[in-house]
Image (cartoon, rainbow, N blue to C red):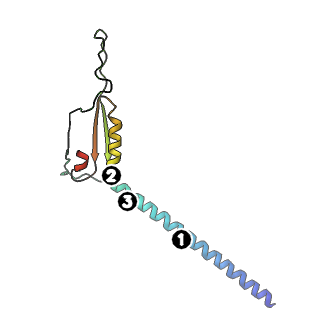
Amino acid sequence: MLVKMVYSFCRNVTRARSFAMGVVILFVVGVFFFNNSYMMADDASQDFAMIPVNDTMAVCFESFDDTRKLLYGEVTADSSTPEPAAPIIYFVTPTYPRREQIAEITRLGQTLMHVPYLHWIVADDTDGCNRVLNS
């Protein structure tokens, strides 16, 4: 009889613990989903924030000089067959300040030196001009 009472008590305690654990897990999952949806709504409001009317854009550096050297020198073509002009490529690179920024921009610039008729625009996400990017 005593064994039966102890067994019944332990079984009820185990059920109560299982129920309590289920409630705790359900609460944690609910808090996670609520917090996640709240943060996503906050990110969306920041992404589509209104741009202030008096926000000004600054052009830090412009260079229209092509200092690249031709690999094989000037190539003379037969003037009897007119070649169509190649299109101009506008290559826009958005960037933000970080440790690897200068190395990546330099590497990309060395690669882009081989592309003819290219206008490269580097859009730096800072309030002021960056001296290192201008050189």
Q: Amino acid at mark 1?
A: Phe
The 10 Å Cα crowd at callout 2, few under 14, some 14 to 19, many 20 or more, is: few
Query: On the image, numbered disc 3 is attached to which residue?
Result: 42
Q: Which mark is residue 48?
A: 2
Q: Position of residue 120 (x, y in %)?
A: 28, 37
* For marks 1 and 3 on the same chain, the one whose residue lies earlier in the sequence: 1
* For marks 1 and 2 on the same chain, the one whose residue lies earlier in the sequence: 1
Query: On the image, numbered disc 1 is attached to which residue?
Result: 27
Q: Amino acid at mark 3?
A: Asp
Q: Amino acid at mark 2?
A: Phe
State the residue at coordinates (42%, 62%).
38
State the residue at coordinates (32%, 27%).
71
Per the model, the C-alpha gap separating discs 3 and 2 is: 10 Å
State the residue at coordinates (35%, 51%).
100
Q: Position of residue 61 (x, y in %)?
A: 20, 43
Per the model, the C-alpha gap separating discs 1 and 3 is: 22 Å
In the picture shown, does residue 39 fall above or below 115?
Answer: below
The 10 Å Cα crowd at callout 3, few under 14, some 14 to 19, many 20 or more, is: few
Q: Is residue 25 left or right of residue 123?
A: right
